[in-house]
Amino acid sequence: FAFSVNAQSGQLLDPYDRNGAQFWCGYALLWFLKHNPTSDLWDPIEEAVDDFFTLANATYWTGNDAGLQTHAFRLGKGKYTLPSYEFDPDILPQACSTEHNLDGFFALKLAGEVLGNAAYTAQAALLRESLLTRFWDFSHDRTFQGIASPTQVDTCHALDCASWYSLVAEDALDRAKQEACLRIVEDYAVTDQGVHGYTAYRPQYGYPGAEDSLWVEGTCGVILAWSAAGRVDRALREHIQLASLLRPDGFPYVTQNDP
């Protein structure tokens, strides 16, 4: 699955490989199968998902003895060098992103359920245990942004690390971590153009100079987190407000450009 399609540069399939994007592509296809179990697309989708997980496990899965990175996926492959934007396809980053591994958990769990594959279900359980232990900053009652190496954590934090993580905590029936995440989400709250939502980054969480720009995608993630936690009234209220930002060509990415 390509990381992105760029219709303006002429380079249609971005060679950048990041597991988070790949996991969500797989998740979307599996979601389609779940709701269309008699589709003629079943076989090619199952083959595509199996091929991806085979590659991801062979290339990025850390396995049983990787220190703090045990039972997790590394970032992916390739890197752009700024400001020249030159691409090196051979760089294999060693960090494990919290966000990407949250994505991986959801994809693996759904793959096990939809495809009836016990191996995916078992791997999802291993990844969930890693997220609940090694990716959680017990000193500050929140997640790490990632694990940079088998011995070093990334102490920064971004919105997804709280909103998406709360859903994994709910899946594990870990209400303490779920509530801790929802408390941290409040630190990202902003109001712009009369709409209450959430920004991606905060100075106190490792992003000096971060601005109060409402991030639509991230706000949707928080709305889902509120709903999953049973706070449906709040989720609906914020969802209805967000709809006022809709334009003829869709939603804006953010309400203010934030360098």
Image: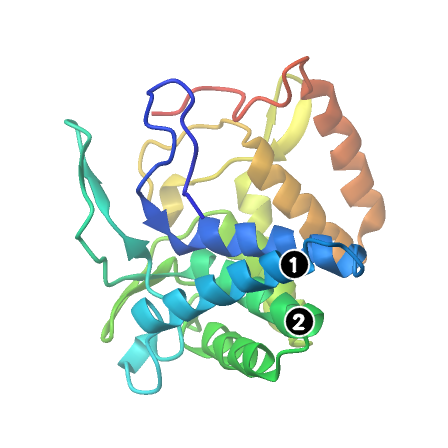
Above or below: residue 250 compared with residue 28: above
Total number of numbered discs in the rendering: 2
Q: Position of residue 19 (x, y in %)?
A: 41, 56
Tag 1 or tag 2, which sits nearer the N-term?
1
Q: Residue at x 60, y 63 (%)?
A: 46
Q: Nearer the viewer, residue 162 or 42?
A: 42
- Residue closest to the eye, 196 or 51: 51
Residue located 21% across and 58% down the image: 92
Can you tell which quarter of the image residue 109 is in?
bottom right
Residue designated by label 1 = 30
- Left or right: 205 with respect to 35? left
Amino acid type for the residue under numbered disc 2: Leu
Q: Nearer the viewer, residue 247 or 180?
A: 247
What kind of element bears circle 2? helix
Q: Residue at x 83, y 49 (%)?
A: 232
- Left or right of 65: which side holds 2? right
Whole-angstrom CA distance, mark 2 to mark 1, is 8 Å
Does 45 appear above or below 8? Answer: below
**Residue 86 is drawn in which quadrant?**
top left
Mark 2, residues whose alpha carbon is within 10 Å: few (<14), some, or many (≥20)? some
Query: Amino acid type of disc 1?
Result: Leu
* Quadrant of the drawing holding the C terminus: top left
Q: Is residue 211 left or right of residue 86?
A: right
Q: State the mark number for residue 220.
A: none
Q: Position of residue 42 (x, y in %)?
A: 68, 59
- The residue tagged 2 is 115
